Structures are given as C-alpha cells and as structure tokens.
Image (tube, helix red, strand yellow):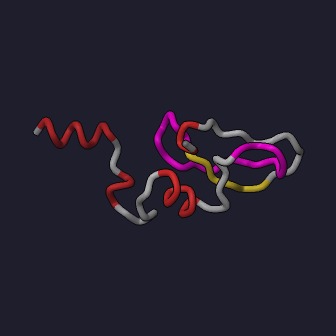
Amino acid sequence: SITAIPIDRGTCHGVEKRFAYNPETRRCQMFHYSGCGGNRNNFPDRKKCFKKCIGRKVNDPCSRISDNNIQNVLKH
C-alpha cells in the first residue's frame, strides 16, 4: 500500500514541489522531489495525494479533524 511507503525525495539534484502521504502524521505533506528515483508515494498535488491515500476530498472538513480532537469530543 502506498500509505506504508516512506517519503523518498529520489537520487537526483532537482527540486520539484510534490506531495506524499506521511504514515506517521497520516496526512499528505509537501516535499521536494529530486526528479528521478523515489517511489510511488509521490503526487503532483495535494488533491491527488488525498484522493489516492485518504479517499476524501481535500475540502472535506472531516479530513482536517485530528484524532485528539475526536477523542476530546467523545469525552464530553
């Protein structure tokens, strides 16, 4: 699964703005891709990353709620 693959900037010296899923934070984040190498966890924009890795629309308010906030709501 792409969601288990760590972010890999690749082996060249370029700097391309890309997005990848970060399994630690469970969010799509921007990173600088070198232009070659790397892996499948590499998307041209945040929207494509969310669609493939999270399955929600970027503007979906549920995608912005953290686990801590959910736990706080459930406690009250």
Residue pictured at 53% horizontal, 42% vertical: 3
Residue farthest to the right? 13
Q: In the image, what residue occupies the spot 25% across and 42% down?
A: 70
Q: Is residue 1 left or right of residue 72?
A: right
Using residue 35 as the reference point, say whether residue 7 is left or right of it: left
Residue 35 appears at what percent x and percent y?
83, 52
Quarter that holds the N terminus: top right
Residue 60 sits in which quadrant? bottom left
The C terminus lies in quadrant: top left
The quadrant holding residue 59 is bottom left
Nearest the eye: 67 or 8: 8
Q: Is residue 56 above or below residue 76?
A: below
Span highlighted in magenta in the image: 22-39
Residue occupying the far left of the picture: 76
| Residue 34: in magenta span | yes
On screen, residue 48 above or below 42: below
